[in-house]
């Protein structure tokens, strides 16, 4: 995902010198094209995330042109939350807040680097639009969209996994793109998910062929999706999210359904539940423990259709 | 000499009226941040001196100058001064902290008043000011950003992140003024977390810095004018007195944001009118 970001930013920034990237000393090799070709639009702020966010918020507001801040997930979400709240969200700064390391992407680095509370922290902020791409193609499309015009109408949060993700659009091509989400059809159970965990859902869907017809809905643009009629299409729904339940997409969708007095489906929610991490946890193990790996998803769906 | 005396009287009159406006507002809302608002008053008079001295219209002034009051809890002092110089009408100032009023307890961004950002959460203003000044520099526009910090606020780590940045690159059209009133909310800064010697610390960052009496408008303005002529950021350590202007609030911790009685307010007004402190 991050390579797609770097390539697309270089292309977009070449069209408009008012767009800038502020990064917290990460992205070795990711932004080479931008650094070499557009050094005036690339700013390495070192390890000073609070300063970087406030500076970038004011800079982009004063220029009235979209810019981006980028670093590892918790350091651009929880560490700088007050700056995001005051200087970005309430101030409606035209800034893309981009994190890398969603969920357990930085698994071996330990819990300090996990991105599992970010959505709760960002989604609670007013004016902030959340984007959760499921593969590199989504990242390229979203980046193009953010910088298509000189200024975005609202601050955005772009949540990247890391690098090396599969090209889901190529490996699982039977989807339709609905703008705010991608949809792989099915008739028995609907999985609603977002981000890189979509791959696990699609693998489970594939493995269950002949036993269950599973639909997968991967939400990319939360603001647009939640502004639409978000009622699930099927009456059995499994939410899969590589983040905490508080602030999750499941919470938002179910709250909207309750407010609209819609009939609620039968729901299973799988998300991150651990309260502490005392040993190294690699992502496959973390997914398994939380019922988010493909085998656990298969098992959950079998139980749901019985 | 006569001109200097005239200017002094003019500045003194605006400072006095600013404090009277703060007191008048306190009467209608109860508690305000007396200590920091009184200490920053002459700094604000010096900042707006070109308007007060009628060298520039207010519109021309704010076209060239943006204020970020990083110690946003003292926003009342800005509104009170803008009322004293005829920019903010009485009826608008009277809405301060009132339900539906235009002015909140912490200052809000207002381009029509030249106020560059909403503040209140301490430790944001310097980075914000650098971002605004950085945008001016990038766009090749003239103009300047002035950031007013509080000494207690210097405890915030984000300020030191910003100062490290300035240490590396100080080519910003930026004036930083520290309202160094030497008090936090609960006591003396020196007793809680000392920041001194602040001038030496700033100079150690290779940032231009000078100390000045923060209640001497002429001295403040001179140093602002002198250092603005050089196209880079500079830091003024303005030594002030918390609660300045009223004998019983000067340097008294509890007047940080104490709810004043009607008797207190009357004493404050009487002292200011008599020119006691």
Image: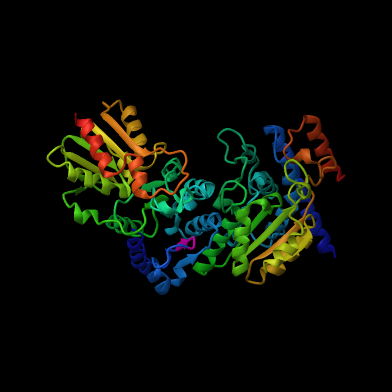
Query: Can residue B112 be seen in the rendering of this structure?
Result: yes
At x 64%, y 66%, the residue is B233
Q: Magenta stretch?
A: A21-25
Q: Nearer the viewer, residue B266 or B210?
A: B210
Q: Quadrant of the N terminus of chain A?
A: bottom left
Q: Nearer the viewer, residue B47 or B9?
A: B47
Image coordinates of residue B46 in percent, x first then y, are 72, 57
Rendering colour mode: rainbow
Horizontal side of residue A284 vs B34, given as left or right: left
* A81 in relation to B261, above or below: below
Q: In the image as oriented, which residue stretches furthest toward the bottom?
A: A36
Image quarter of residue B207 = bottom right
Horizontal side of residue B135 vs A197, given as left or right: right
At x 31%, y 44%, the residue is A224
Asked if the stretch drawn in magenta spans residue A302, the answer is no
Q: Quadrant of the C terminus of chain A?
A: top left
* A267 in relation to A180, above or below: above
Image coordinates of residue B243 in percent, x first then y, are 78, 44
Query: Can residue B61 be seen in the rendering of this structure?
Result: no
**Secondary structure that dominates the magenta span:** strand
Q: Nearer the viewer, residue A26 or A133?
A: A26
At x 86%, y 46%, the residue is B277
At x 85%, y 65%, the residue is B1
- Tally of numbered discs: 0
Image coordinates of residue A217 in percent, x first then y, are 24, 43
């Amino acid at each position: 995902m991050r390579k797609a970001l770097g390539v697309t930013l270089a292309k977009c920034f070449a069209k408009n010198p008012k767009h800038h990237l502020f990064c917290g000393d990460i992205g070795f090799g990711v932004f080479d094209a931008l650094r070499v070709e557009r050094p005036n639009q690339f700013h390495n702020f070192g390890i000073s995330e609070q300063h970087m966010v406030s500076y970038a918020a004011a800079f982009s507001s004063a220029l009235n042109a979209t810019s981006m801040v980028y670093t590892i997930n918790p350091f651009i979400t929880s560490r700088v939350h007050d700056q995001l709240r005051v200087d970005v969200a309430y101030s409606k700064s035209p800034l893309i807040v981009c994190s890398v390391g969603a969920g357990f992407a930085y698994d071996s680095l330990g819990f300090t680097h996990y991105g599992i509370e970010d959505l709760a922290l960002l989604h609670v902020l007013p004016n902030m639009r959340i984007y959760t791409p499921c593969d590199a193609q989504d990242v390229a499309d979203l980046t193009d969209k953010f910088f298509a015009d000189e200024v975005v109408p609202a601050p955005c949060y772009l949540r990247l996994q890391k690098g090396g993700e599969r090209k889901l659009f190529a490996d699982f091509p039977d989807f339709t793109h609905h703008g705010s989400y991608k949809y792989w059809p099915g008739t028995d159970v609907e999985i609603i998910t977002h981000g890189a965990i979509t791959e696990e859902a699609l693998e489970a869907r594939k493995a269950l062929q002949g036993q269950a017809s599973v639909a997968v809905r991967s939400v990319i643009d939360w603001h647009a999706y939640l502004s639409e009629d978000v009622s699930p299409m099927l009456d059995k729904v499994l939410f899969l999210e590589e983040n905490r339940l508080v602030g999750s997409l499941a919470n938002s969708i179910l709250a909207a359904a309750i407010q609209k007095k819609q009939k609620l489906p039968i729901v299973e929610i799988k998300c991150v539940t651990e309260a502490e991490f005392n040993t190294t946890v690699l992502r496959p193990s973390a997914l398994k423990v939380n019922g988010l790996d493909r085998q656990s998803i298969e098992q959950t769906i079998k139980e749901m259709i019985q | 000499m006569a001109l200097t005396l005239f200017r002094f009287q003019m500045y003194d009159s605006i400072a006095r009226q600013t404090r009277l406006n703060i007191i008048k507002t306190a009467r209608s809302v109860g508690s305000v941040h007396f200590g920091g608002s009184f200490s920053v008053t002459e700094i604000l008079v010096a900042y707006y001196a070109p308007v007060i001295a009628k060298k520039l219209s207010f519109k021309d002034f704010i076209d060239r100058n943006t204020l970020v009051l990083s110690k946003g809890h003292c926003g009342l002092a800005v509104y009170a001064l803008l009322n004293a110089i005829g920019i903010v009408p009485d009826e608008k100032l009277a809405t301060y902290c009132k339900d539906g009023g235009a002015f909140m307890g912490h200052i809000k961004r207002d381009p029509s008043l030249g106020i560059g950002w909403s503040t209140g959460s301490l430790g944001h203003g310097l980075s914000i000011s650098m971002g605004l000044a950085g945008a001016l520099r990038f766009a090749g526009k003239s103009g300047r950003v002035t950031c007013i910090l509080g000494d207690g606020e210097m405890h915030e780590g984000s300020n030191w992140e910003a100062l490290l940045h300035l240490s590396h690159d100080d080519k910003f059209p930026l004036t930083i003024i520290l309202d160094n009133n030497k008090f936090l909310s609960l006591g003396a800064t020196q007793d809680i977390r000392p920041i001194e010697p602040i001038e030496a610390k700033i100079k150690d960052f290779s940032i231009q810095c000078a100390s000045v009496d923060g209640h001497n408008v002429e001295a403040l303005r001179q140093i602002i004018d002198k250092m603005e002529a050089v196209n880079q950021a500079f830091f003024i350590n303005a030594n002030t007195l918390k609660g300045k202007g009223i004998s019983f609030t000067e340097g008294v911790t509890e007047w940080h944001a104490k709810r004043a009685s009607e008797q207190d307010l009357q004493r404050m007004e009487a002292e200011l009118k008599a020119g006691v402190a």
